[in-house]
Image: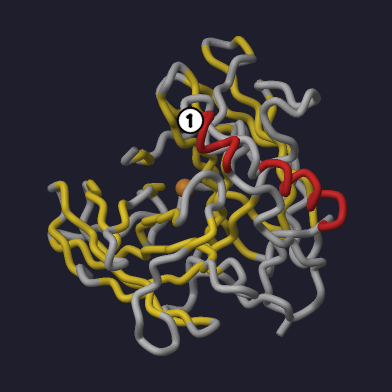
Amino acid sequence: MNTGLKITAFAAALAATFGAAYGVGEALDPVVAEAAPKHEKRHEPPSAGAHTAGGLQISEGGYTLELETPRVAAGNRADLRFTVRDDRGRAVTEYRREHDKELHLIVASRDLLTYRHLHPTRAADGTWSTSVDLPRAGGYRVFADFTPARKGAENLTLGADLAASGSYRPQELPRPAATARVDGYDVELTGTLQPGRASELRLSVSRDGKPVTDLQPYLGAYGHLVALRAGDLAYLHVHPHGEPGDGTTEPGPEVSFTATAPSTGRYRLFLDFKHDGVVRTAAFTVEAGEQAAPSATPEHSDDGHGH
Ligand SMILES: [Cu+2]
């Protein structure tokens, strides 16, 4: 099993960074942030076969994602409801918080043009719910990224299919590009994703040609990056280097990450960043293992947030 998503490469160096990150929350929520225990997440060394690709299975490690709303109508705000069940079928009600949340929900269209990063609400019985706005019909994948509180449980990303009814016109994946534009911001990507090897990705945010140097912390970081593999939507959650308030991490214009691609092929990267109080998503297509610099053609995409 060499297909593992090695999101924790450089583990030794980053473990300290990440561990500390859990003690730092959004500026808006200092009480919760201070109360969050440190070193919640264990980052293991990238031993071969330690992980399978995230998000490809509805059930893994004894936990199952039960999506109660597998069909919605495109073009309307829809409610998503789901439950995570353990190996005995009981709804999971205790989670370890990661990046300020018990569970992160990503919804992406199969053609990778629509992306949503949501934080659902959990009812006491373990049912999670959130509303989502999917403008386009077609096949989607829903990813639940969480860590059960049970001792020894690891971080998991379970995936389930979601269909949005309506007239479906699948789009081609945008070409690889080093820049992305979203809401008047330009984000430039430096670095390439390497198959089976950790590499650094740096994303630099500017607006009107000026570097943005006052990015705001969002879920304890200046940026969150998710990578999805084109073709099967294998899920790769990547974490930034450093965190707000550590004395060395600047609030932009650059946010950097370490990531390892599980294979060659195309990936779509989604960078969430917060500025002027709004979380925005910049999206890039990258080719893992590609040495040549991608074209610098800006692209525009239908990405957004349901926060
Ligand atoms: Cu999240």
Q: What element carries label 1?
A: loop
Q: Residue at x 15, y 48 (%)?
A: 75
Query: Toward the viewer: 162 or 128?
Result: 128
**Which amino acid does the dot numbered 1 rest on?**
Asp
Whether residue 5 sits left or right of residue 46 in the image: it is left
Q: Is residue 79 positioned above or below 18 on the image?
A: below
Up-down: is 98 above or below 209? below
For residue 159, what is the image quadrant?
A: bottom left
**Where residue 12 sits in the image (x, y, percent)?**
86, 56
Query: Circle 1 sits on which residue?
Result: 29
Question: Is 112 left or right of 179, judged from the image as shown?
Answer: left
**Of 262 and 12, which appears nearest the observer?**
12
Placement of 291 over or under 150, stated as above or below:
above
Q: Residues within 10 Å of mark 1 (few under 14, many from 20)?
A: few
Which quadrant is the N terminus positioned in? Answer: bottom right
Quarter of the figure with the C terminus: top left
